[in-house]
Image (cartoon, rainbow, N blue to C red):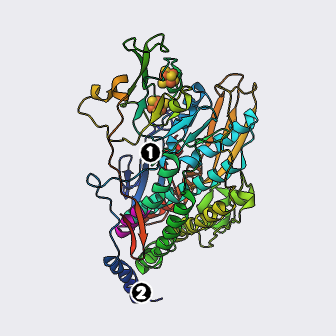
Amino acid sequence: MNTATGIIKALNSGIKHLAIKRFTLRYPEEKLKFVGDGYQFDPSTGVGIAGSKGRHMLFHDKCTGCQLCSIACEGVAEAIGMVKVPEEHKHNKKAIMPQIDYGKCVFCGLCVDACPFYALYMTNDYELSSFSKEGLIYTPAQLQVKPYVSQDVEIQITNRGATHG
Amino acid sequence: MSKELLPGLALQKVDERIMTLNVGPQHPGSGHMRIIVQIDGDFIVACDPDPGYVHRGEEKMAEYRNYITNIPHLERPVIHDSCNVLYPYVLGVEEILGIEVPERAKYVRVIASELNRCIYTMYWLAIYGIFLGHSTMFMWPAGDRELLIDLMEKMTGARVTHAHFVPGGVRNDLPANFEDVCLRQVNYFEKRIKEYAAVFYDNPILIARTKDTGVLSRQDAIRLGTTGSVLRASGVDYDLRKKEPYDVYDELDVHTNVMKEGDSYARSKVPWLDMMESCNIIRQALQKMPKSGSVRVKLKPNPKGKVFDTVYKRVESGRGSLGCYIVSDAKPEPYRVKLSVGSFRNLIALPYLLKGEKLGNMPSVYWSLNYWPVEADR
Ligand code: SF4
Ligand code: SF4
């Protein structure tokens, strides 16, 4: 192939893109949809359930304060600390629950794998930025809140290229 | 001077004409490493790559963490290729602990590692494009990579650093309907990367810049111990997926792409051809995969190995052969973990390739070696 044809072909394949749909996700307005409600783990079978690894969610009525999540995280990021909570739950004798520092967490989900009581799951919430380091530390009360997410955009593939919905 | 100076401190005598340049370690054209080049006019007379700027002590860290908590940090060397970095470690631990992996998990692993190989190669290709001043080739791979990252996100829950492989299988099963979505996006991805031929690989400007630069002959490639795409671009048909199949690669039909030239152009084209091969492997694996079954065997908490059991496993990563040597101890922590990475072996060829080259060709020769600084430093 001679040089001129090669360059014309290269330009041509670029120009074709004027007719192809845009593949950009306009992030704060559009958010990508994930599968499920976040990464979960079933201790009875020992297999996880697929989902996004985002901010954790703690079920106060299930957590027994066994500290296994904190021990699992020790080798990873030491993001979990056990803190005192008001003695409301009978099954939580020591009245301690995990508090997670998102300045340290790497979102590996090993703490979710470690929890034997279905008390700690992950959610689809990934927008955790804060103005201070203290703001990244989530107390058990904050972890209890179910996040509000509006993620509905999916990749669609048509004859004119792929787009974000 | 009476006292001998250490080799690194000794002053070098250089010619008046020779100028020494430090490229890096914080230079966009080198990644996190320094290349010391000596140039005479426009031509490189000597080159001394100096890795180690981002050494993080991953191997030492692995001695203080147990077999499971090693997973998130051992994949940090190459976050785009995290499944492949973890693969030899996981295979090794499985042998040490004597775990039999379920069939479906093996297929899921193959799919994940092939997707990861493509994600890594796309990133590498994007950087290669921008090194050559071809900004279209930066934008397209960076955008099309999103198709596969989306798949990995559905599969593992994270865009990079998936922490998906564990000794005994994978962390979670595939989500519902994954096979269809995967097939659709991989097919479209393959169609897209074929379009790169006209704009990049058949582009006369690229060919003029990279053909016959940094030629690595077949003998030299073997003698210097290069691996992966660098070795295959020099005409040696060597791919661990074929030569030492691990998991279910022996049941899949794997083709290797070999080119004879051994120049920058061939080294940049082989990974691109490999991506199409990866798409083939993914399609085969999706078809042959058992439709149901367990994907993870349950381990005891804190599994322990035997005293001084050693194992060496290697896999084909995006950058060539990637090995992991593990010595176990009668503790939940390994005694020693050593990674042997393709990046570092390929870097050894750099001084030989750059001698006599023009300085302007340095980025293209350097990046065509498929070198990832963070992986080499560990
Ligand atoms: S996700 Fe990983 S790093 Fe984060 S708290 Fe859990 S174990 Fe620790
Ligand atoms: S979250 Fe689970 S693992 Fe952590 S203390 Fe509560 S019950 Fe134990």
Residue B359 visible to an observer of this rendering: no
Q: Residue at x 66, y 69 (%)?
A: B235
* In front of the other: B55 or B22: B55
Q: Which residues are magenta?
A: B131-144
Mark 1 and mark 2, same subunit?
A: no
Ligand 1 neighbours mark 2 (CB distance < 8 Å): no
Q: Does the Cβ of the disc 1 residue fall within 8 Å of ligand 1?
A: no
| Amino acid type of the residue tagged 1 in the rendering | Gln
The chain letter for the residue carrying disc 1 is: B
Does A144 sit left or right of A133 as displayed?
Answer: right
* Residue A77 coordinates in the image, percent (x, y): 46, 28
Neighbour class for label 1 at 10 Å: few (<14), some, many (≥20)? few
Residue on which the image places disc 2: A3
Q: Residue at x 63, y 45 (%)?
A: B87
Does B166 appear above or below A65?
below
Q: Nearer the viewer, residue B293 or A8?
A: B293
Disc 2 residue crowd, few under 14, some 14–19, many 20+, Cα 10 Å: some
Residue B330 in the magenta stretch? The answer is: no
Task: Report the front residue among A78 and B321.
Answer: A78
Which x, y percent locates residue A146? Answer: 36, 35
**Where B20 sits versus B253, above or below?**
above
| Amino acid marked by disc 2 | Thr
Residue indicated by mark 1: B12
In whole angstroms, how far apart are the C-alphas of marks 1 and 2? 46 Å
